[in-house]
Image (tube, rainbow, N blue to C red):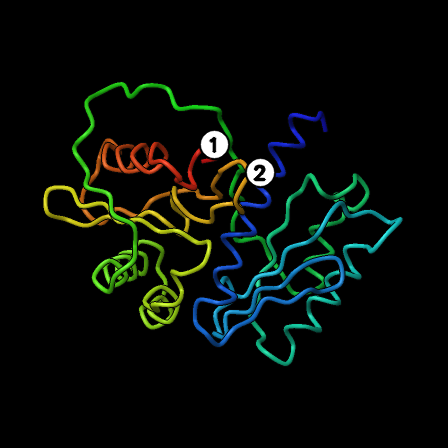
Amino acid sequence: MHDSMTNDFAVIDENLRAAMRFFGYATGTGEIAPVPGGIAMYSGLEYGVFNIAMLDGRVSQTGLTLEERLVGIAQYFKPKTARWSLWLCDDLLDYATRRRARQTLSDFGMRAISHPPGMIAPALLPPNNTLPPVDVQAVKDKASQDAFTEITSICFEIPFGVAQAVYAQEHAWHGDYRGFVGVAAGRVHPAGRDGIAEGPLPPGQPRGDAGRDIGILVRDRHGDLRVGLGRHVSSTPGSPARRCW
């Protein structure tokens, strides 16, 4: 990679890791632990997408192979849960590893369920139309936690009990993860997990976000509420959504 591309990748990668670490401490029954060639976030729940593994550095045949890393991850999760997920960046795999990655993952009983892109930009262009007013509030009290939990459960088809165990916990919101709710026309809309405002980087690092979408419960045919909420969050001083979308 060129230096600029490497720096951009580092912003997206570290920001995603900050977001994923949320699930290791949100419930109070999970943990974050190193595994051979990677890191694991265990939520304490029997819910695969909240039990997460990520790889460290490039993967090739000259160091720890993909197979060796998967063995270590599987051994970590085995006494805890049968359901876990791997967040993998294709660009970290060398050509030979990438060619057989699908088969390797299949051999470990894994299948691809999503291919979210990492996107980054120095700034947002002006909107093409007038956006509706949105009152954006950080998730911090019980009312905003409950609103965020309910809408996230519905929009992303997460069982409500699972969403509640993660997002409705007071201590969950005291770490690096940030969620926001927006009130428009008397209705509440969230941004956070899979949204535009989660996982700020450590102090002194470029701000970014690993989000991909925002859950909106009401009809938003032209996406104006999503655009308005996203722009407000990304323009807020100290916001985690500064360069990445």
Residue at left offset 40%, top offset 64%: 172
Furthest toward the bottom, the residue is 79
Is residue 178 or residue 109 the one in the foreground? 178
Q: Eyeballing the image, is 43 above or below 187?
A: below
Could you say where residue 148 lies in the image, as x and y percent from the top left?
Answer: 28, 57
Q: Are marks 1 and 2 in contact (CB under 8 Å)?
A: yes
The residue depicted at 35 percent of the width and 66 percent of the height is: 163
Q: How far apart in space, not on screen, are marks 1 and 2 (Cα)?
A: 9 Å
Q: Please name the residue that numbered disc 1 is placed on.
A: 243
Residue at x 29% of width, y 34% of height: 232
SS state under label 1:
loop
- Horizontal and vertical percent for residue 111? 60, 57
Q: Can you identify the residue that label 2 sits on?
A: 11
Name of the residue lying farthest toward the left: 186
Instruction: Give SS at disc 2.
Output: helix
* In the image, residue 245 above or below residue 53: above
